[in-house]
Image: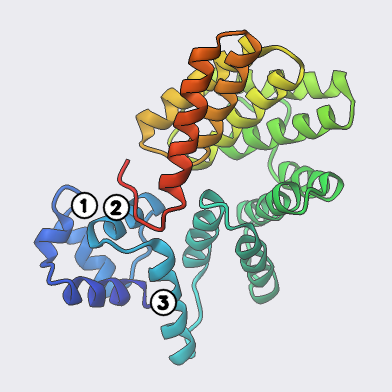
Amino acid sequence: MKNLGSTLRIIREEKSFSKEMLSQGICSLEVLERLEVENTVPSLSLLRKICDRLSVTIDDVMALCEVNASNNEDILSKPEWFTILEHYLITKQYVRLNEAANRVLSETDDLSILENQLLMYYRGAYEMVYERNMETAFKYFSRSLNYTYQEDSSHPSDLEVILMTLLGYIHHRWGEADRAQELIEKSFELYIKHHSFSMKIRLSQLFYFQSMYQLELSLPQEAMEITDVGISWCRKMMNMYLLEDLLYIKGMALEDLNRLDEATFFVELANNLHVLETSGEVINF
């Protein structure tokens, strides 16, 4: 998708946007020009804002880019592939996520440790959420964590903390309570101590699985407290990934606490957000 910038330029021109109009309030004019002319790969956050301004979805842009790449016998760069992978993750397109991850693994020889770590994480997410195959997901998540994690590390990455939460949750589902508690508690402690990675959209997974763990242990108060942290974080970061799910978990926790009116409010809010997310429109948070 070396033609991402040129594809966005074509869409911009078709919609009669000048560069100044498109970049205003989103990025500098220089950044947009580098994107369009040099085909530099934007961050996922920037790409979402540009697509929102142009009233197109990221999927529309990706599809057009892939068609153009196929026609031009072009090859996607690694940064472009990983932008696509992250997009598939946060939009819950797990089949596409798995297909893209497998394609990167089969077509790319010079993957770094961190790139391999991400690919194992993406494959694990597919197995856990889409296939409901906890055993295979556990293998991928363990392999992903083992690429970089060290017990004495003073600066864990966001992905390491997420992976520890995911592994802890799987241990919980397997009935291995002690190991589950150890990983769940440690991962949340690391999150509390280190906020340098808090800009990552995927961090919503930490709040989701932490709160689900507490709810399934019949600890609704603890579950609600974690969802409150997650919901507040999503709002602060203008991040809709798993926000609907966190609102729903909070509703279930409130129901368990016999706070039925509040529970109904949050469940309805989650349902309304689901309608917005699946309406096919670009949502501006």
- Look at the image and tell me whether residue 28 can be seen: yes
Report the Cα–Cα distance between label 2 and label 1. 9 Å
Q: Amino acid at mark 2?
A: Lys
Q: Is residue 69 above or below residue 170?
A: below
Q: Amino acid at mark 1?
A: Cys
**Dot 2 alpha-carbon crowd within 10 angstroms: few under 14, some 14 to 19, many 20 or more:** some
Q: Amino acid at mark 3?
A: Cys
Is 188 left or right of 34, judged from the image as shown? right
Q: Quadrant of the N terminus?
A: bottom left
Is 156 left or right of 90, judged from the image as shown? right
For mark 2, what is the residue? 49
Report the Cα–Cα distance between label 3 and label 2. 18 Å
Instruction: State if disc 1 and disc 2 touch (CB < 8 Å).
Output: yes
**Dot 1 alpha-carbon crowd within 10 angstroms: few under 14, some 14 to 19, many 20 or more:** some
Residue drawn 70% across the image and 54% down it: 126
Q: Residue 35 is drawn in which quadrant? A: bottom left
- Look at the image and tell me whether residue 197 can be seen: no
Residue 65: mark: 3
Residue drawn 61% across the image and 65% down it: 96
Q: Quadrant of the C terminus?
A: top left
Q: Residue 71 is drawn in which quadrant? A: bottom left
The x, y position of residue 75, in whole percent, is 51, 81
Instruction: Nearest to the eye among marks 3 and 1: give it.
Output: 3
Residue 207: mark: none
Sooner in the amino-acid sequence: mark 3 or mark 1: 1
Q: Is residue 105 above or below residue 271?
A: below
Residue 27: mark: 1
